[in-house]
Each structure stands twice: as C-alpha cells, then as structure tokens.
Amino acid sequence: MKSIFVSYVYEDIKYLNKIKRWESKGLLPGYTIVAEKEDNRTSGKKAVKEYLKPLINKANIVLVLIGDNTHNHNWITWEVEVANSLHKDIACMRIPNTTGSKPQILNKYPELQFHANQITSKF
C-alpha cells in the first residue's frame, strides 16, 4: 500500500476531501491518503512543523494541490522542501477551474489533472 501526503492550502480543503472520497470509493486501489486532520496554524510554526514532518516522512508520495493561492503560500514550499530532503516522489494536481501558478519550487514536477486515474497512472 502506497501512502500519499496531500499538501494544500487549507482553504482548499474541499478538494482534499474529494480525494479522500476517491479513496473510500475504491478509486485509488493500493493507495491511502495522509493529510493534516486539523488546522494547526494558531499553534505556531514549530508546532505545525512537528505535526507535518512525520506525516510527510511516512508517505511514499507528496501530492501538491495547485489552486489560485498556492503560489504565495509558504507552507506549501516548506512541505515540498521537506519532501525533497526525504527523497519522496512529488507531483502537482491542478484544482479545477483555477489558474494560479505553481510555486517556483514545483516547476520541475508534473502537473496532473484532477482525476483519480491521474494518480494511479503516475505512481
């Protein structure tokens, strides 16, 4: 079973929930979704990092959701830096009907369309 850490801007949580529904409906056979379960930003940066790093570490893949506000979000960049340091597979998935650019750190990674089969065919 491969685990996927989903990196996203918290305001885009409905798309994380859709990916979790793909998993529960059996559309991601052989994969399990790992993501933050709560918004920890009010706990401070150190607490957020301590919470997220083990989740990224235990994942096989980091999937970054790209939307209108992803390009200016420092946490996305930090999560990708951690994933890179841990030698994780990384891909981006475009949120439907958005045109925001990817953070520069993600320019070399493929951008998938927002469909379950994009994940299963890539990894």
Image (cartoon, rainbow, N blue to C red):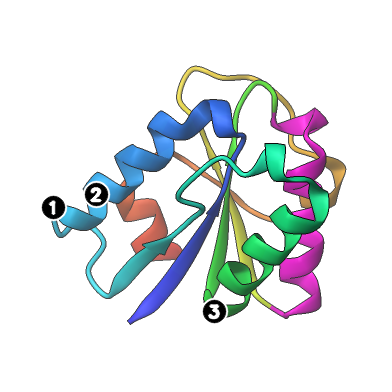
- Label 2 sits on residue: 22
Q: CA distance from mark 2 to mark 1?
A: 5 Å
- Occupied quadrant, residue 40: top right
Res 107 visible: no
Amino acid type for the residue under numbered disc 1: Lys
Pinpoint residue 43: horizontal percent, then vertical percent.
71, 45
Location of the N terminus by quadrant is: bottom left
User: Main structural element of the magenta stretch: helix, strand or loop?
Assistant: helix
Quick check: 43 above or below 110? above
Q: What label sits on residue 101 in the rendered view?
A: none
**Residue that badge 1 annotates:** 25
Identity of the residue drawn at 74% across and 60% down: 49
Q: Is residue 45 left or right of residue 59?
A: right
- Taking the spot 62% from the left edge, 73% from the top edge, the residue there is 54
Magenta residue span: 70-87
The foreground one among 87 and 12 is 12
**Label 2: how many residues lie within 10 Å, few (<14), some (14-19) or many (20+)?**
some
Q: Which residue is drawn at the image coordinates 62% and 34% (left, top)?
A: 9
Q: How far from the left and from the top, in percent, is residue 2? A: 39, 78
Judging depth in this view, the residue of 97 and 5 nearest the camera is 5
Residue 58's tag is: 3
Amino acid on which the number 3 mark rests in the picture: Lys
Badge nearest the viewer, 2 or 3 = 3
Q: Amino acid at mark 2?
A: Trp
Where disc 1 sits, the SS reads loop
Q: Position of residue 79 (x, y in %)?
A: 73, 57
Q: Nearer the viewer, residue 121 or 52?
A: 52
Residue nearest the viewer, comparing 44 with 23 = 44
- Residues at marks 2 and 1 touching, judged by CB atoms closer than 8 Å: yes
Residue 78, given in percent of the width and then of the height, sits at 80, 54
